[in-house]
């Protein structure tokens, strides 16, 4: 065997093998969003499920993000056909109720689904403490760079997207993110568009 | 007989002039088709977020269809193709481009295949020059 030739071939193949190996460590579905740090896109969407008690909104009412300037807002994109949305439903509903007195607003955004399906799903799941709005033309979904459900956006008091979570959220994650957003001092620099 | 009549009917039908599409303004139609062409071109370069390797132009997914409408709307509102692309990059990152911008680290994607082809050619050339014909079976 020609050891010199074999070692040259090995050295040439090594970077390609390393590149392929690096590729296997990455999740192709985990795509970094450019939104965190930027001003959250405003929207005007109609309420399709009113929510409960303190968070209740009139069905058909229009919700805009700008109405809640200076408050922490959690936007959760969901659908009745989404299985993972079932896993996070209880956590979202409970934490939204627990943080209502601290000025945190939760909104569900129905994605690629019929409002009647959404309302039926909420009923099946035993209710939802916060209201849900409909995004019939998916423009809000596009504005938020959505590529699946569930996806949850945490918007700080400064109006910027602080964090985007892909997949079902847990109580622990919601509490951690909300506590850090509520504790954050008001930003002095203007939010970038 | 039936087939003969059918063929005759088809021949007559093909000779009929195409129905005129009523247009209010010829220049408007030309502008619309130019707009559609640009919209198709931009949409063909944008990745469908809910598909695997499809452009929003080719994807039948609802989200892709809506993105396609948005591309056309933005172009009709006077945005340039680059501004429309920038809008989508601002929402989804450079990932949304089917062909990444040839700058920075992305250059690797463009230059690596060329480097590999040149390297391969050099190896083949060197090998053939050293061993050219040495292993060819001799004719008896």
Image (cartoon, rainbow, N blue to C red):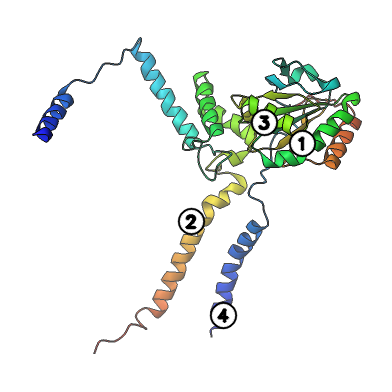
Cβ atoms under marks 3 and 1 closer than 8 Å: no
Residue visible at 39% across and 23% down? B33
Q: Is residue A153 above or below residue B33?
A: below
Indicate left or right for B112 with B38 as reference. right
Which circle, 3 or 1, is nearer the viewer? 1
Instruction: Please check whether the numbered discs 3 and 4 fall on a single chain.
Output: yes
Is tag 3's residue or tag 1's residue first in the polypeptide sequence? 1
Cβ atoms under marks 3 and 4 closer than 8 Å: no
Q: Label 3, label 4: how many angstroms apart (C-alpha)?
A: 55 Å
Residue under numbered circle 4: A4
Kindly indicate the quadrant of the structure image that contains residue A41. top right
**Residue A99 numbered tag:** none
The numbered mark 4 sits on a residue in which chain?
A: A
Indicate left or right for B102 with A179 as reference. left
**Residue B114 numbered tag:** 2
Is tag 1's residue or tag 4's residue first in the polypeptide sequence? 4
Q: Position of residue B93 (x, y in %)?
A: 63, 38
Q: Label 4, label 2: how many angstroms apart (C-alpha)?
A: 26 Å
Which circle, 3 or 4, is nearer the viewer? 3
Instruction: Please check whether the numbered discs 1 and 4 fall on a single chain.
Output: yes
Residue visible at 82% across and 22% down? A55
Q: Residues within 10 Å of mark 4 (few under 14, many from 20)?
A: few
Kindly indicate the quadrant of the structure image that contains residue A169. top right
Instruction: Please check whether the numbered discs 4 and 2 fall on a single chain.
Output: no
Q: Label 3, label 1: how many angstroms apart (C-alpha)?
A: 21 Å
**Residue A144 numbered tag:** 3
């Amino acid at each position: 065997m020609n050891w010199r030739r074999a070692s040259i071939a090995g050295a040439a193949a090594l970077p390609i093998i390393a590149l392929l190996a690096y590729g296997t460590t990455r999740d192709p579905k985990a795509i970094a969003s450019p939104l965190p740090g930027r001003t959250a896109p405003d929207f005007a969407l109609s309420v399709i499920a009113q929510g409960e008690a303190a968070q209740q909104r009139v069905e058909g009412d229009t919700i805009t993000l700008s109405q809640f300037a200076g408050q922490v807002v959690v936007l959760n994109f969901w659908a009745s056909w989404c299985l993972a949305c079932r896993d996070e439903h209880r956590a979202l509903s409970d934490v939204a109720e627990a943080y209502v007195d601290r000025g945190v607003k939760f909104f569900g955004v129905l994605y690629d689904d019929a409002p009647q399906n959404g309302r039926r799903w909420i009923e099946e799941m035993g209710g939802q403490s916060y209201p849900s709005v409909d995004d019939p033309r998916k423009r809000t979904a596009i504005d938020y760079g959505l590529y699946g459900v569930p996806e949850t956006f945490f918007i700080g008091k400064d109006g910027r997207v602080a964090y985007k979570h892909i997949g079902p959220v847990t109580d622990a994650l919601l509490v951690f993110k909300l506590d850090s957003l509520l504790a954050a001092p008001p930003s002095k620099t203007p939010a970038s568009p | 007989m039936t087939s003969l009549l059918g063929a005759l009917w088809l021949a007559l039908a093909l000779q009929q002039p195409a129905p005129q599409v009523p247009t209010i303004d010829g220049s408007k139609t030309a502008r619309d088709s130019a707009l559609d062409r640009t919209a198709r071109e931009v949409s063909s370069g944008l990745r469908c977020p809910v598909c695997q390797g499809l452009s929003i132009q080719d994807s039948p997914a609802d989200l892709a269809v809506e993105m396609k409408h948005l591309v056309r709307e933005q172009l009709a509102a006077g945005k340039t193709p680059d501004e429309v692309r920038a809008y989508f990059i601002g929402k989804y990152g450079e990932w949304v481009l089917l062909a990444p911008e040839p700058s920075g680290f992305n250059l690797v994607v463009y230059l690596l295949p060329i480097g590999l082809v040149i390297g391969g050619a050099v190896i083949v050339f060197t090998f053939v020059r050293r061993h050219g014909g040495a292993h060819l079976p001799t004719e008896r």
